[in-house]
Amino acid sequence: MPVPRAGLNQQTVVREAARLADEVGYQQLTLAALASRLGVALPSLYKHIRGADALGQKLAALATAELATELTTAAAGRAGGDALRAMADAYRAYAHRHPGRYPATQRVPDPSDPEHLEAGERAVGAIFAVLRGYGLTGDDAVDATRALRSALHGFVALEAAGGFGLPREVDRSYHQLVAGLDVAFRSWPARGA
């Protein structure tokens, strides 16, 4: 559904790019397809976005902010394994609901983009808050965050690609992964061990 030209601004362009990415896939999102979707000539987009990389950056900031909000909301008022499960479920649900914009959450924030930096800090902050419930802080929290992110992203990326062909319920496998992370975080090795 084309957006009226008078309504175009950077926020409108990025939000429509996010919707389009969810429909066609992150890798298939192009400026030409977005211009067509918005009902404008391709050069008109450059009034609102500097190019494909800038669009990717702004889409990453938007998606990371959305994910950060979902992680924070899911974990609020919970602790330990309960917080971890709620956050992990929110992570996977976001990836399912937004298959095109989810991959953009993996982009490292651009230091010159304060919105993306803030969104990234909120997302990591949500994870750090859950990990504090396990007594993990400092370098241990960084290591545990990397382990958590690798596990969750790896699972949802394989799931999205149809990479789970064994005859076993995928939801059960995901819950077992999260349960395994809970055990790992409860028995995290002391630094230097």
Image: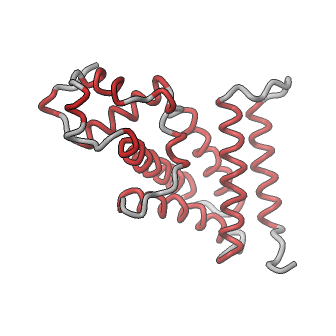
Q: Is residue 48 left or right of residue 174?
A: left
Q: Is residue 22 above or below residue 184?
A: above
**What is the x, y in percent for residue 109?**
46, 57
The image quadrant where one finds the N terminus is: top left
Q: Is residue 29 left or right of residue 182?
A: left
Residue farthest bottom in this picture: 192
Q: Nearer the viewer, residue 77 or 115?
A: 115
Q: Is residue 24 above or below residue 95?
A: above
Q: Is residue 163 left or right of residue 96?
A: right
* Residue for point 33% across, 32% down: 16
**What is the x, y in percent for residue 32?**
33, 25
Q: Is residue 92 above or below residue 97?
A: below
Q: Is residue 69 left or right of residue 45?
A: right
**What is the x, y in percent for residue 33?**
36, 23
The image quadrant where one finds the C terminus is: bottom right
Colour setting: secondary structure
* Residue for point 68% across, 47% down: 152
Q: Tell how many labels.
A: 0
Q: Nearer the viewer, residue 46 or 5?
A: 46
Q: Is residue 11 above or below residue 21?
A: below
Quarter-of-image position of residue 31: top left
Quarter-of-image position of residue 127: bottom right
* Residue for point 68% across, 51% down: 85
**What is the x, y in percent for residue 153?**
66, 45
* Residue for point 67% across, 28% down: 161
Q: Nearer the viewer, residue 165 or 69?
A: 165
